[in-house]
Amino acid sequence: MTTDFKLTYATMFNPPEEMHVRYEAALAQVTANLGQACAMVINNKDHFSEETFENRSPVNTDWGAGAFPAGHRPGR
């Protein structure tokens, strides 16, 4: 793959095929990770919580973006 293509106003109406291929590959990667449990990162460490909440896509609320740990202030 060539990496020197830049999408600009001048090129957006006739992008090279490579842009479509790379877009579809990235979309497949993102879609494969939708709905997974995510961690809070605190001091560069993953932290999970028994209490979670689900975040849904604003574009299509049928799509679950992920399950995220509910964070609270210490001592709560």
Image (cartoon, rainbow, N blue to C red):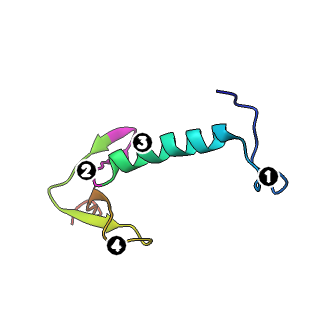
Is label 1 or label 2 in front?
1
Amino acid type, label 1: Thr
Q: Amino acid at mark 4?
A: Thr
Between marks 2 and 4 in the image, the one whose residue lies nearer the viewer: 4
Q: Which residue is tagged 2?
A: 37
Quarter containing the N terminus: top right
Which sits earlier in the primary sequence, circle 1 or circle 4? Answer: 1
Distance Cα–Cα, label 1 vs label 2: 35 Å
Q: Position of residue 58 (x, y in %)?
A: 43, 72
**Helix, strand or loop at mark 1:** loop
Q: Is residue 28 left or right of residue 64?
A: right
- Residue occupying image coordinates x 30% and y 69%: 62
**Disc with the residue nearer the chain's start (1 vs 2):** 1
| Label 3–label 1 contact, CB within 8 A | no
Question: Which residue shows up at 30% across the image and 41% down it?
Answer: 46
Residue occupying image coordinates x 70% and y 31%? 3
Range covered by the magenta-colored residues: 35-45
Q: Quadrant of residue 29?
A: top left
Q: Does residue 30 appear left or right of residue 3 in this picture? A: left
Residue holding disc 4: 61
Q: Which mark is residue 8?
A: 1
> Which of the two residues, 74 or 30, is positioned nearer the viewer here?
30
In terms of sequence position, does the residue under pointer 3 or pointer 1 come before the other?
1
Residue reaching furthest right? 10
Q: CA distance from mark 2 to mark 3?
A: 16 Å
- Measure the C-alpha gap from mark 2 to mark 4: 17 Å
Q: Secondary structure at mark 3?
A: helix
Q: Secondary structure at mark 4?
A: loop
Q: Residue furthest left?
A: 50
